[in-house]
Image (cartoon, helix red, strand yellow):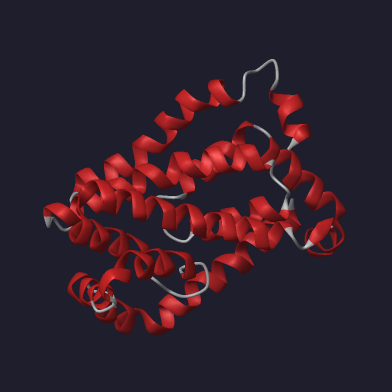
Amino acid sequence: MKRLALIFLILAILVLVPFLLLGDRIETWMSMDNTVATLRSTGAWAWAAGIGLLVVDLFLPILGTVVMSALGLIYGPIVGGALASIGSMASGLLAYGLCRSLGRGIAEKIAGPKGLAEGERLFAGELGGWTIALSRWMPLLPEIMTCMAGLSRMPLRRFVVALGCGSVPLGFTFAAIGAAGVERPLLTLILSACLPPLIWLVLRPVFFPKSSTHTNDKLN
């Protein structure tokens, strides 16, 4: 468990440092107006540029919620929300895939045999789904949790469902805010925080009935 906590801390530092060093520049460059102008400068490919920015948020200090709002302003709450959700999902899947592709041998060297076993137990169970769904609306945690889920070899089906429960409401919420021209009201934070767990509560028994959860996790 100590090794997992250390990995979490290292990942958090890697995500946080660029914002600490370039915070003012990022805030200026990624203002709503500048982001919209940047997307519109790509013409008919604005949708692809928006999705691309959300994906590279995994590696670069991109303000994902600003990009989602910009997509909503350009394409409206429905299409913009769908694009924002796709971008968020793609970013999560990329992080998961890259870390899972390291293989069990490398994962054991990074996390240690006991740490990897603990991570696998954590992310294969109920807590893993809750963690992925809830982390999508929190700062720093989306990239960290998806990486740790991949490293811990979280069952793919459980990961995708939990990721969708967090990414889709987040994408549509901020796209709607962007379309309405509202600057992140308290309602946005409440919806972003409450919808993922509610959706996970609904979908969890559908995709993972108690009688077959263990079997499904093994198959995935």
- The part of the image, by quadrant, that contains residue 107 is bottom right
Q: Position of residue 174 (x, y in %)?
A: 27, 52
Give the vertical position of 55 relative to 4 (above or below): below
Give the vertical position of 208 relative to 145 (above or below): above
Q: Nearer the viewer, residue 164 or 192?
A: 164
Give the vertical position of 96 relative to 120 (above or below): below
In this orientation, does residue 15 appear?
yes
Which residue is at 40% across, 29% downward? 198
Which residue is at 49% across, 27% downward? 203
Q: Nearer the viewer, residue 6 or 160?
A: 160
Give the vertical position of 134 relative to 50 (above or below): above
- The part of the image, by quadrant, that contains residue 4 is bottom right
Q: Position of residue 115 (x, y in %)?
A: 79, 52
- Please give left or right for residue 27 compared with residue 55 in the image: left
Q: Position of residue 44 (x, y in %)?
A: 28, 70
- Please give left or right for residue 129 compared with residue 125 in the image: left
